[in-house]
Amino acid sequence: MNALILCGGQSSRMNSSKSLKMINGKPAYLHWINIFKKIGIEPYISCRQSQKSDYQFTNFILDNSQDKGPMNGIHAAIQKHHDVAWFIFSVDLFYAEISDFSLLINSFIGTEDAICYCNKDRIIYPLFSIISPKIYEVINNEISKPNCSLNYILKNCNTKIIEIKNENKLISINSEEQYQQFIESH
């Protein structure tokens, strides 16, 4: 299994890139890289070519275009390493903890196409998921469609869904105000 840390967003509502915001004294992308390394998963950063110089890291999956959002990075990842499962993770899920990663990994037995978290209302969170090679053909077929999304794919495949106990862990940090609330709570 490899990990894909999605860092290709524009962070238009923030004063700087979300992936460069600090978590426990480190830029968010480094914080997540260290977590994945700690649990024995090889991490890759998904970003645009123009963002690559922002990161002090060597494993990159570069987005080829900007019109598909995170699906560009996911598609590029499965093209590069099509024989392994991918742990998909959005860099802006600042409240996630190592136990949340471990629960997904330990619950992924390989008979399912994917596994992801949901909230109490059963809304799934595709950018905190594991996808298996069994789903890659579906992704390859869907990527050319105008409204391609991992959410749609996971809803229409054999996806194991785990309800997360603390829904705050699924909150994306999308503004300076939300980031300050995160800092104050930690």
Image: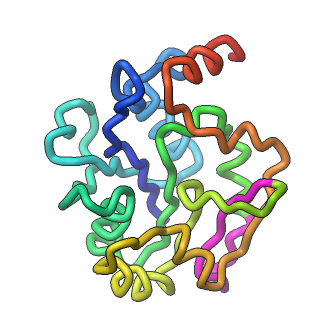
Find residue 133 and report its horizontal and vertical position in percent: 47, 81
Choose between 169 and 53: the one closer to the eye.
169
Q: Is residue 50 left or right of residue 114?
A: left
Find out whether residue 108 is within the magenta segment. Answer: yes
| Quadrant in the rendering for residue 17 | top left
Could you tell me which quadrant the C terminus lies in? Answer: top right
Instruction: Check the image and tell me how it is coloured.
Output: rainbow
Choose between 12 and 22: the one closer to the eye.
12
Residue in the image at 49% along x and 83% along y = 135
Residue in the image at 21% along x and 48% along y = 48
Find residue 179 and report its horizontal and vertical position in percent: 55, 21
Find residue 54 and report its horizontal and vertical position in percent: 23, 30
Residue in the image at 81% along x and 58% along y = 121
Find out whether residue 88 is within the magenta segment. Answer: no
Q: How many marks?
A: 0
Residue in the image at 74% along x and 37% along y = 168
Find residue 1 and report its horizontal and vertical position in percent: 49, 65
Q: Is residue 159 left or right of residue 32?
A: right
Furthest residue in direction front, as rendered: 146
Q: Which residues are magenta?
A: 107-119
| Quadrant in the rendering for residue 4 | bottom left
Decide: is 81 above or below 125: below
| Quadrant in the rendering for residue 178 | top right
